[in-house]
Image: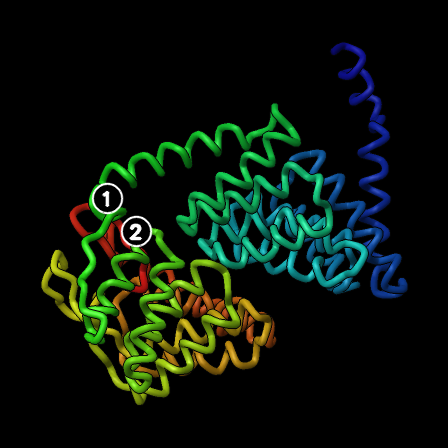
Amino acid sequence: MKRVAQNSKQGNRSPISGWLVLLVVAILLGSTLLIPPVRTLLFLSKGDIDAYFANKDAVLDDYRSALNADPDNETALLKCGLVYRDAGRNDEAYESFKKLYGHPTQKFAAIPYLVSLSLKRHAANEALQYATEWIEHDANSAEAYDARGLAYEQLEKFDLALDDFNKSVQLNPSGSASEDRDDVLQKQREWKRMTQGIFDPKLEDKPEDYDALVRNARKLFRGYSWAQGEEMATKAIKLDPNRPQAYYVRAAIHREANRDAQALVDELAVLKYSRAKPFVMPKLEDEPVDQGFTRCHVPPSRVNFYVASSYYALKQFKEAFRYVNEALSMPPDAPYFVCREYELRYPLDLKFGNSKQAQEDGVKAAASRAKVPAQPESQGGVVMPDWF
């Protein structure tokens, strides 16, 4: 301590402080005259030194300045993304990592961050796509399977989540997937406890009754008997191919089974045969009376949203953008679906270069989410799939 005090009295500086002074002088006096790569390197170096001294405000300014000098600089994109993430600015962090993802050599360095941020932004389908791409790139990554399991968990696809968590534990027994697996097992036990009777539904023996076949398909689907539910919906379609209800149920089954192309075909059929008007699903015996747009009353905006979601999953982004805009131009659905519509349009806004609209959509999604009841699609305390 005495030596440090003596040195400071004599005007000596530490090596780091000396470099900082040199960097600041170089940036202030010569940055406008330097070629962009040199300016970028100077700002990155200054940002690293400010980070060393915990000067948080200056760090972000430095890395932003580095990006201004070279907007595609991989190191600057990574460091900006990390600073945004650590500050809880998830949307801005996501945008930085998304740009980093566009660099072929950095694509898989960006994906883990994109998965994590997508989950924080409740964009589970997007997280699922990134995590699947990660697994396809590295089938022996325990972290990749854990990430996809978390995406499935957020989508309430517990069986698929457990498969991925088990694979992650197999690859790395000491990883975090074992705790994630326990959480899903607990959720699954609770779900089954609350849904006794749903998994062994009483079906109607009316093979020539369209509404009865659709009700049976709905019961089988919510009891996770997807193959039987699809078969029942198909029988209803053969009985009357010009009504939208059975296509709507079958599309839901395809979506849950990740058959996006088949879901899209049925969703477009729903639009065709509903003539873009609200329609009513055959009511189940134990279903509460509808108030507004709930399980039985389906508005056209909801169908357009599902069409947009399927196009997005198939990476047909122009069509996805068209249909989500169509959904948002219609009379609003329940807050839960309005929130999902804005959340879907947000990444499309960014993809098509409309960052201002993306910010507005993020705000509107948050406002809609705040209006959603704790269990928007519940029945007897059980949260049901949102297509009902």
Nearest to the observer: residue 115 or residue 99: 115
Q: Is residue 373 above or below residue 143?
A: below
| Residue 123 on image: x %, y % | 48, 57
Q: Residue furthest top?
A: 2
Q: Residue furthest left?
A: 289
Nearest to the observer: residue 58 or residue 110: 110
Q: Is residue 245 left or right of residue 308?
A: left
Amino acid bearing label 1: Thr
Amino acid bearing label 2: Gly
Residue under the point 45% across and 80% down: 323
Image quadrant of residue 171?
Answer: top right
Image quadrant of residue 256?
Answer: bottom left
Tell me the residue that label 1 is attached to.
195
Residue under the point 16% across and 67% down: 283
Q: Is residue 42 left or right of residue 192?
A: right
Circle number at residue 223: 2
Nearest to the observer: residue 96 or residue 269: 269
